[in-house]
C-alpha cells in the first residue's frame, strides 16, 4: 500500500503531504480544487510520461515522493534496490528543461523501471474510462484479461507478423516478364564487369605499399646505398667499428669483470646494426626504376577507383556486391521455383495463424461463459437487480488478425422482458459506469495489484445506485487500498479515510490544502454539502447523519 505521498510544486499544488489509510480512501472537494491532480502526481511518480506543464509557475522543478510497503516490490527489484523491512521511498523530479530523475530507496531508477513497478502496484481507472465500453475492442481486451490469455495473444501477434512478412515477400517477388528480363540483364552486366577485374582481397593494401616505392625508386635507392655503406660496407663502417669495440672489451673483461655489461650492450647494438643493414640490402635489391610496372600499378589503381565508385567504398565491398548480385541473379533466373516456395511458405503461415485463431476462439467461448454470470452478479449488486448480461463471441468472417478472428461484445438487457442489445446502443452513462465498475471488480478479483485508484468512475449515477457503488468500493477496500475521487456523498460516507481537498489564495498565490475529516465534526458538514450543494441545510445535515450512521461497519 501507499503509506505517504509528498508533492512539491506540481500544477497548483505548492506543498502537500498525504498519509492515506488502509482500505477505502475518498477525496472530495469542489471541481478544480485539485483532487485529480493528486492522481496525476501519483501517476507521474510511478513512471507516467512527464510534462513540463505540470511545473508550478515560478518553480524550477517539481518533486513527488511516496513511501510504499516493502512487500509491494517484485522480487526482481528487491535486491537491486536493497529493499528491506522498512517502508521504501520512491522519488521522482522534473525540471523546467523536461529532464526527469527518479530514485527507489535512494538508488537511481529509470522511468521504465518505475513503470514496471507501478503497473504491478497501482491500477488506475479514469473518470471517463467507462466510455471505452462503447467500443467492442475494449470488450475483447477485457475478456482476454479475465481469461489470462496474454501469452496466447502474444503468440497470435507473432504468427500474424510471420504471415504478413511471408505475404510481403511473395508480393515483392511477383513482377512482369519484362521487368524480370531487364533485371537479369543488368545483374549479368554488373557481374561481368566485376569478374573481369579479377579482384583479390588485400589488393588495395598491396598497391598502397608498392606505389610509393616505385614513384620514388631513384631517391630511395640512393639513400639506401648511402645508409648501407655507412652501416656495413667497407672499413670504417659502423658494424666494423662495433666489432672491434666488442673484441676490445672482451679482452678487458679478463681484468675487470664490471665491463661485461658494457660488452654485452655493444654486442646487442652490433646485432641491431647488422639487422638494419640486412633490411637496407633487401630494399636496395627490390627497389629500382621500372616505368612499365609503375604504369601498370597506376592503371590498376584507377580501375579499382572506378569499381569502388560504382559498387562500394572498398574492394571488400565490391566483392560483397558481386556475391549479392550473384544471389539476386540466381533468384531471378529461378523465379518460378521461388514463387512456388514463397506461396507455400505464405500458405503455411496462414494455416498456423488460422489454427491458433481457432484455438483462441474456443478459449474465449469458455471464458465468456464464466465472465458473463460474474459480471451480471456484480451489476445486480450495483443497483440493477433485474439486468441480464451476456458476452457474445463471434467469428468475424474472413478475419485473421493479430488478436485473432473474434468479435467480442457485451450485450445488456437492463430491464425484465427486454432483449439483450449491445452496450453502445442502449446503455446510459450511469449504466456504463456500473458495468465498468463491475468489470473492474471481476478482473481485480483474480489480480494481485494492491492499490486501486478510481478517479470519478461513479460519474453519471446517484441516489440508491451511488450507495450500491459505495458499498462495492468499501467491500473491495477490505482486500486492497483504494483511492477514490468522488462528488457523491453516498460513496464518501463508506470510506474509513475521508480527505477534503480545497484551494485558497495566500500571498497572491493559489494554495491547495487537504484535510482528513474522518473522526472530525467537519465530515458531517462536508457530506451535507455534497448532498445539498454549496451550502449545507438542516435537511441535508440530517440526511448526511443518516448516511454516515448507516454506512458504519
Image (cartoon, rainbow, N blue to C red):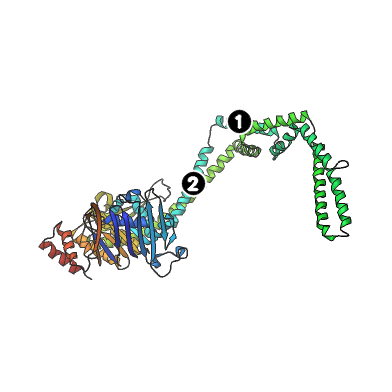
Residue 505: image quadrant is bottom left
Residue 389: image quadrant is bottom left
Give the left or right position of residue 549, taking residue 43 as reference.
left
Q: Which residue is mark 1?
A: 186
Q: Are marks 1 and 2 in contact (CB under 8 Å)?
A: no
Measure the C-alpha gap from mark 1 to mark 2.
32 Å
Q: What is the crowding at mark 2: few (fewer than 14 residues within 10 Å), some, or many (at least 20)?
A: many
Residue 119 picture location, percent across and down? 39, 58
Work out which residue is located at the far left of the displayed protein and give it: 538
Work out which residue is located at the far front of the displayed protein and give it: 255
286 and 491: which one is in front? 286
Residue 153 picture location, percent across and down? 43, 54
Give the left or right position of residue 531, taking residue 12 as reference.
left
Residue 186 vertical position relative to residue 346 in the rendered view, above or below: above
Give the left or right position of residue 153, taking residue 37 as reference.
right
403 and 476: which one is in front? 476
Residue at image location 13% in from the left, 64% down from the top: 541
Q: Nearer the viewer, mark 1 or mark 2?
A: 1
Q: Which residue is mark 2?
A: 163
Residue 192 picture location, percent across and down? 67, 32
Question: Which secondary structure, mark 1?
Answer: helix
Residue at image location 81% in from the left, 46% down from the top: 273
Q: Quadrant of the C terminus?
A: bottom left
Question: Which secondary structure, mark 2?
Answer: helix
Amino acid at each position: 500500500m501507499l503509506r505517504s505521498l509528498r508533492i512539491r510544486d506540481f500544477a497548483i499544488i505548492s506543498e502537500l503531504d498525504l498519509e492515506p489509510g488502509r482500505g477505502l480512501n475518498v477525496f472530495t472537494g469542489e471541481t478544480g480544487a485539485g483532487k485529480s491532480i493528486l492522481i496525476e502526481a501519483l501517476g507521474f511518480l510511478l513512471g507516467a510520461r512527464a510534462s513540463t506543464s505540470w511545473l508550478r509557475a515560478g518553480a524550477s522543478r517539481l518533486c513527488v515522493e511516496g513511501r510504499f510497503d516493502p512487500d509491494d516490490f517484485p522480487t526482481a527489484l528487491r535486491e537491486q534496490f536493497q529493499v528491506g523491512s522498512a517502508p521504501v521511498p520512491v522519488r521522482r523530479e522534473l525540471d523546467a528543461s523536461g529532464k526527469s530523475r527518479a530514485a527507489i530507496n535512494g538508488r537511481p531508477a529509470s522511468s521504465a523501471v518505475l513503470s514496471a513497478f507501478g503497473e504491478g502496484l497501482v491500477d488506475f481507472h479514469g473518470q471517463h474510462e467507462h466510455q471505452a465500453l462503447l467500443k467492442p475492442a475494449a470488450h475483447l481486451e477485457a475478456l482476454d484479461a479475465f481469461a489470462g490469455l496474454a501469452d496466447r495473444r502474444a503468440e497470435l501477434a507473432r504468427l500474424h507478423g510471420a504471415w504478413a512478412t511471408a505475404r510481403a515477400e511473395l508480393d515483392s517477388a511477383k513482377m512482369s516478364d519484362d521487368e524480370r528480363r531487364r533485371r537479369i540483364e543488368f545483374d549479368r552486366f554488373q557481374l561481368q564487369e566485376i569478374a573481369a577485374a579479377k579482384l583479390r582481397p588485400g589488393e588495395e593494401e598491396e598497391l598502397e605499399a608498392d606505389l610509393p616505392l616505385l614513384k620514388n625508386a631513384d631517391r630511395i635507392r640512393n639513400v639506401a646505398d648511402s645508409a648501407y655503406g655507412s652501416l656495413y660496407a667497407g672499413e670504417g663502417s659502423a658494424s666494423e667499428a662495433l666489432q672491434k669495440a666488442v673484441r676490445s672489451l672482451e679482452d678487458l673483461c679478463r681484468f675487470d669483470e664490471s665491463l661485461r655489461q658494457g660488452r654485452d650492450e655493444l654486442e646487442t647494438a652490433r646485432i641491431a646494426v647488422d639487422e638494419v643493414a640486412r633490411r637496407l640490402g633487401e630494399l636496395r635489391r627490390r627497389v629500382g626504376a621500372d616505368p612499365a610496372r609503375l604504369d601498370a600499378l597506376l592503371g590498376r589503381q584507377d580501375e579499382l577507383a572506378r569499381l569502388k565508385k560504382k559498387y562500394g567504398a572498398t574492394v571488400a565491398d565490391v566483392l560483397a556486391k558481386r556475391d549479392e548480385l550473384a544471389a539476386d541473379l540466381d533468384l531471378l533466373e529461378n523465379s518460378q521455383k521461388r514463387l512456388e516456395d514463397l506461396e507455400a511458405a505464405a500458405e503455411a503461415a496462414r494455416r498456423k495463424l488460422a489454427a491458433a485463431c481457432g484455438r483462441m476462439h474456443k478459449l474465449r467461448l469458455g471464458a465468456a461463459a464464466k465472465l458473463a454470470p460474474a459480471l451480471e452478479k456484480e451489476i445486480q449488486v450495483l443497483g440493477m437487480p433485474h439486468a441480464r448480461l451476456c458476452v457474445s463471441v463471434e467469428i468475424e468472417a474472413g478475419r485473421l488478425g493479430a488478436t485473432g478472428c473474434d468479435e467480442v461484445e457485451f450485450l445488456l438487457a437492463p430491464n425484465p422482458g427486454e432483449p439483450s442489445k449491445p452496450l453502445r446502443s442502449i446503455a446510459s452513462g450511469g449504466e456504463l459506469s456500473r458495468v465498468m465498475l463491475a468489470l473492474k471488480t471481476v478482473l481485480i478479483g483474480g489480480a494481485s495489484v494492491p492499490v486501486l485508484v478510481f478517479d470519478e468512475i461513479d460519474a453519471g449515477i446517484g441516489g440508491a445506485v451511488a450507495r450500491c457503488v459505495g458499498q462495492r468500493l468499501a467491500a473491495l477496500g477490505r482486500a486492497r487500498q483504494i483511492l477514490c475521487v468522488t462528488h457523491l456523498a453516498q460513496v464518501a460516507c463508506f470510506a474509513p479515510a475521508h480527505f477534503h481537498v480545497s484551494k485558497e489564495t495566500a500571498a497572491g498565490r493559489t494554495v491547495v490544502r487537504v484535510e482528513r475529516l474522518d473522526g472530525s465534526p467537519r465530515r458531517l458538514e462536508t457530506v451535507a454539502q455534497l448532498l445539498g450543494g454549496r451550502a449545507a441545510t438542516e435537511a441535508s445535515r440530517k440526511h448526511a447523519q443518516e448516511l454516515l450512521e448507516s454506512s458504519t461497519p
